[in-house]
Amino acid sequence: MNLLAFDTSTDTLSIAVQRGDALWQHSGPGGAQASASLIAAVRGLLEQAGLDFTRLDAIVFGRGPGSFTGLRTACAVAQGLAFGANAGRGIPVLPIDTLAAVAEEARQQHGCTEVVAVLDARMDEVYAAPYQWRGGAWHAAGELGLCAPEAVPVPAGWTVAGNAQAAYGDRLASAARHVHALPTATALLRLAPALLAAGQAVPADQALPLYVRNKVAQTTAERAAARAASATPTPAPHQP
């Protein structure tokens, strides 16, 4: 199977191409820079693999949670490339949860099988979800959530995997084992076969990002209204 995968949900851009059993990968700066470099890096990696968009079977991307800008970038690029692939006939898109990819990277790098995957959500919060490896696949062991680092529940003996400990230190499950793991494109490719077999791929127009935090900033109009409200004197109580 020929697959292209990428993740731009964190500060690291990760891309991988699978051609049969062979693998090519690339990493670089993520965040705001990903929108400018992703397509060129994808084309370069496909060229190294001897592939083009007519020979891909599917495009895989990390759908979130994560950076709003990064998720929008990944989704838009996945949709656009998938629409135009296969000589304009299109190919399927497989969105995968970034926290599941974190769990998979922790398993691959550190042998973890019971993982609370945690990514820094900024604004003094983290994204978190628990996963267990059973029967050769990851299974969600609870709900995906957004909370303060102190509020992340970690069962005894489980590993916390992700990138949040660097930001929050002992505020995040200080008694638990911690490993650094990111939602890499290679982790997405390892998860992809089972999800494709389960029918999780969708047409390009149905591939959507997963936003857990609905809003991170006020609009210009909302900020102006808030300033105006704060500047308006409070009427004095009516005197009879």
Image (cartoon, rainbow, N blue to C red):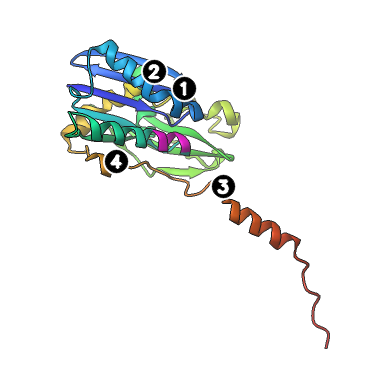
For the residue labelled by badge 1, is the local secondary structure a helix, a strand or a loop? Answer: strand
Closest to the camera, between mark 3 and mark 2, is 3
Relative image position of residue 111 (x, y in whole percent): 35, 19
Mark 4 → mark 1, Cα distance in angstroms: 30 Å
The amino acid marked with disc number 2 is His
For the residue labelled by badge 4, is the local secondary structure a helix, a strand or a loop? Answer: loop
For label 4, the residue is: 207
Tell me, yes or no, if residue 134 can be seen here: no
Along the polypeptide, which appears first: circle 2 or circle 4? 2
For label 1, the residue is: 179
**Quarter of the image with the N terminus in it:** top left
For the residue labelled by badge 2, is the local secondary structure a helix, a strand or a loop? Answer: helix
Q: Which residues are magenta?
A: 69-73
Q: Are marks 2 and 1 in contact (CB under 8 Å)?
A: yes
Q: Main secondary structure of the magenta part?
A: helix
Q: Residues within 10 Å of mark 3 (few under 14, many from 20)?
A: few
Mark 3 → mark 2, Cα distance in angstroms: 37 Å
Res 110 label: 2
The amino acid marked with disc number 4 is Ala
Give the residue at the far bottom of this rendering: 240
Q: Are marks 1 and 3 in contact (CB under 8 Å)?
A: no
**Which residue is depicted at the point 38% across and 16% down?**
26
For label 3, the residue is: 217
Q: Residues within 10 Å of mark 4 (few under 14, many from 20)?
A: many
Mark 1 → mark 3, Cα distance in angstroms: 31 Å
**Which residue is depicted at the point 38% across and 44% down?**
143
Res 159 label: none
